[in-house]
């Protein structure tokens, strides 16, 4: 006999051995789930069955590896409740009706696992509808198939009552479970909205209390008060998006449920409230869908803000790197100019020492003119005076001012404020932006130009306002000039949260200090 036959004989003699490992945490979860379902059933109606909501909420909160313990807790709950019903309804219904609900609903939740990983919460509505439909189908079909005496009530009325009850209960508890499970993924709550949120919840509670104080004969007034509770839920959804709906919808449905008249026994039904609960179901679906859409677009807006801040930071870093490279070149040119001045000074001293005073004088005049021109050109590469003297003095004493004076088209600039209160980066951006704007207007427009600059605060942020205008107010900037200005000036304006406007006879620019954590404002170009 070979080894395989020995193994088969051992299996036949010893039987099949099963090794089951139960974790204490899982057993505690099963007990807690069974107690929660049993307690919730005491406060449930056929039209609002809370254990259905606990079932879906538990599946959303627990990972799939713990679902077996939830099924065990469900079996314990049904065993306590239905074992005494064996004589009246039969053992097949008690076993199959108890063993099929939780696995069927778990299958519905599991089939949506791909959508559950997405940032959107819209998948909760099909999960709720699918779980309610599957559970209702089992609860309605199995009694007709397995009870010794089938129910006498029409199955359509029972199905509608059970489906609405399960669906409302799921919408009352599942959003809270999902909100808790995703508490670390979503951005923090806005502190400024805490007071309005609490106030809206208090208003909902006050309306629920008012509905309970309504006289029993005034059914229409009670229904109207309950429907008014939807208004705070709508406001919560508009304030917080899906998270507001995840608070408002459960609060709305639970308050309506606990203000519904009941016989005091599990499985009660109130026909007067049933029609209103249908309206509440529609309102709940609309609020959760609306909240999901609002949160989706808010996430997109935040994503665009993050991308915009990243682009702004990258643009500003690139501009500063270019400026630092130009600064190194300007300093190198200055060193070259100083070396040339020293060499020419030595040559002039030699000429004077050997009696060539006329040649030395002509050389001195020529070298002084070229040295001044050389320094002016170097200052146009990078305005080193800006770092020590500020933007305004750099504009009035550097090479750019000499170049403007040679055109005889630039009026005396009108400068106000203290530019030294601004960062060097912002002053450099203003310097480059202003010189580019003047250069373009000198090249493509005719007539005199007037420059204005004013430093100050705008919306609690330091910044500078720049303006380059044609003195002739009757003329307008041409469309090609406006397009060139937009192309050349927008990059620096974007990097410093600025605005470029071309209107009438002038181009106006605003550059602001950009906070590190604040979203950048997009620069815009407005045509005349």
Image: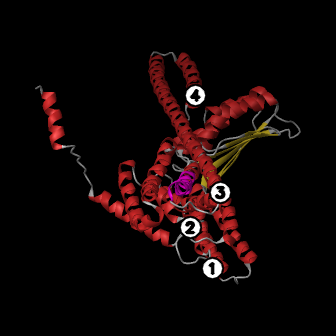
Q: Earlier in the sequence, mark 2 or mark 1?
A: 2
How far apart marks 2 and 4 lie (CA) works out to 65 Å
Q: In front of the other: label 3 or label 1?
A: 3
Answer above or below: position of 286 versus 219. Answer: above
Mark 4 lies on residue: 372
Is the C-beta separation of discs 2 and 3 under 8 Å?
Answer: no
527 sits to left or right of 199: right
- Residue segment shown in magenta: 131-147
How far apart marks 3 and 1 lie (CA) works out to 34 Å
How far apart marks 2 and 1 lie (CA) works out to 23 Å
Which residue is located at x 52 percent, y 33 percent? 318
Q: Secondary structure at mark 1?
A: helix
Q: Secondary structure at mark 3?
A: helix
Q: Earlier in the sequence, mark 2 or mark 4?
A: 2
Is the C-beta separation of discs 3 and 1 under 8 Å?
Answer: no
Which residue is located at x 56 percent, y 37 percent? 311
Mark 2 lies on residue: 194
Answer above or below: position of 297 versus 207. Answer: above
Q: Earlier in the sequence, mark 1 or mark 4?
A: 1
Mark 3 lies on residue: 156
Give the percent coordinates (x, y) of residue 105: 49, 51
Q: Earlier in the sequence, mark 3 or mark 1?
A: 3
How far apart marks 1 and 4 lie (CA) works out to 87 Å
Q: Secondary structure at mark 2?
A: helix
Q: Nearer the viewer, residue 142 or 470?
A: 142
Q: Nearer the viewer, residue 110 or 434?
A: 110
Give the percent coordinates (x, y) of residue 402: 66, 32
Q: Secondary structure at mark 4?
A: helix
Give the percent coordinates (x, y) of residue 106: 46, 50
Mark 1 lies on residue: 209
Residue 145 drawn in magenta: yes
């Amino acid at each position: 006999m070979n080894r395989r036959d020995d193994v088969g004989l051992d299996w036949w003699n010893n039987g099949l051995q099963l090794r089951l490992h139960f974790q204490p945490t899982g057993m505690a979860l099963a007990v807690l789930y069974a107690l929660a379902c049993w307690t919730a059933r005491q406060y449930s109606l056929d039209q609002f069955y809370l254990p259905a909501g606990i079932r879906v909420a538990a599946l959303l909160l627990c990972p799939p590896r713990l679902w077996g313990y939830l099924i065990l807790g469900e079996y314990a709950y049904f065993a306590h409740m239905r074992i005494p019903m064996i004589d009246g309804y039969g053992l097949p219904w008690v076993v199959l009706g108890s063993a099929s609900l939780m696995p069927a609903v778990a299958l519905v939740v599991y089939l949506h696992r791909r959508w559950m990983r997405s940032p959107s919460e819209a998948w909760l509505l099909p999960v709720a509808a699918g779980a309610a439909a599957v559970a209702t189908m089992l609860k309605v079909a199995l009694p007709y198939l397995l009870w010794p005496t089938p129910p006498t009530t029409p199955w359509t009325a029972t199905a509608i009552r059970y489906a609405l009850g399960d669906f409302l209960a799921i919408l009352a508890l599942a959003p809270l479970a999902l909100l808790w499970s995703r508490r670390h993924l979503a951005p923090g709550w806005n502190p400024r909205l805490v007071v309005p949120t609490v106030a809206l919840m208090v208003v909902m509670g006050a309306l629920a209390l008012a509905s309970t104080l309504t006289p029993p004969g005034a059914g229409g007034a009670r229904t109207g008060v309950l429907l008014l509770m939807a208004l705070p839920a709508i406001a919560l959804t508009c304030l917080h998006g899906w998270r507001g709906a995840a608070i408002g919808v459960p609060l709305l449905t639970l308050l309506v449920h606990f203000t519904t008249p009941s016989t005091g026994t599990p499985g009660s039904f109130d026909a007067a409230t049933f029609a209103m609960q249908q309206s509440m179901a529609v309102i709940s679906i609309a609020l959760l869908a609306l909240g999901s859409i609002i949160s989706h677009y808010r996430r997109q807006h935040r994503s665009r803000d993050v991308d915009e801040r990243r682009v702004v930071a990258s643009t500003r870093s690139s501009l500063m790197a270019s400026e630092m490279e130009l600064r190194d070149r300007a300093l190198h040119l200055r060193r070259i100019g100083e070396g040339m001045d020293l060499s020419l000074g030595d040559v002039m001293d030699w000429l004077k020492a050997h009696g060539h005073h006329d040649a030395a004088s002509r050389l001195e005049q020529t070298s002084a003119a070229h040295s001044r021109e050389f320094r002016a050109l170097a200052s146009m590469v990078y305005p080193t005076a800006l770092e020590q003297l500020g933007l305004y003095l750099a504009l009035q004493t550097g090479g750019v001012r000499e170049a403007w004076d040679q055109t005889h088209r630039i009026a005396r600039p009108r400068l106000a404020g203290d530019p030294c209160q601004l960062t060097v980066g912002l002053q450099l951006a203003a310097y480059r932006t202003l010189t580019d704007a003047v250069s373009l207007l000198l090249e493509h427009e005719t007539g005199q130009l007037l420059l204005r600059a004013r430093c100050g605060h705008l919306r609690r942020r330091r910044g500078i306002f720049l303006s380059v205008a044609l003195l002739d107010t009757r003329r307008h900037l041409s469309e090609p000039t406006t397009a060139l200005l937009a192309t050349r000036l927008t990059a620096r304006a974007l990097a410093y949260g600025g605005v470029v406007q071309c209107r009438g006879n002038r181009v106006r620019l605003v550059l602001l200090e950009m906070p590190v954590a604040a979203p950048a404002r997009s620069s815009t170009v407005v045509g005349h």
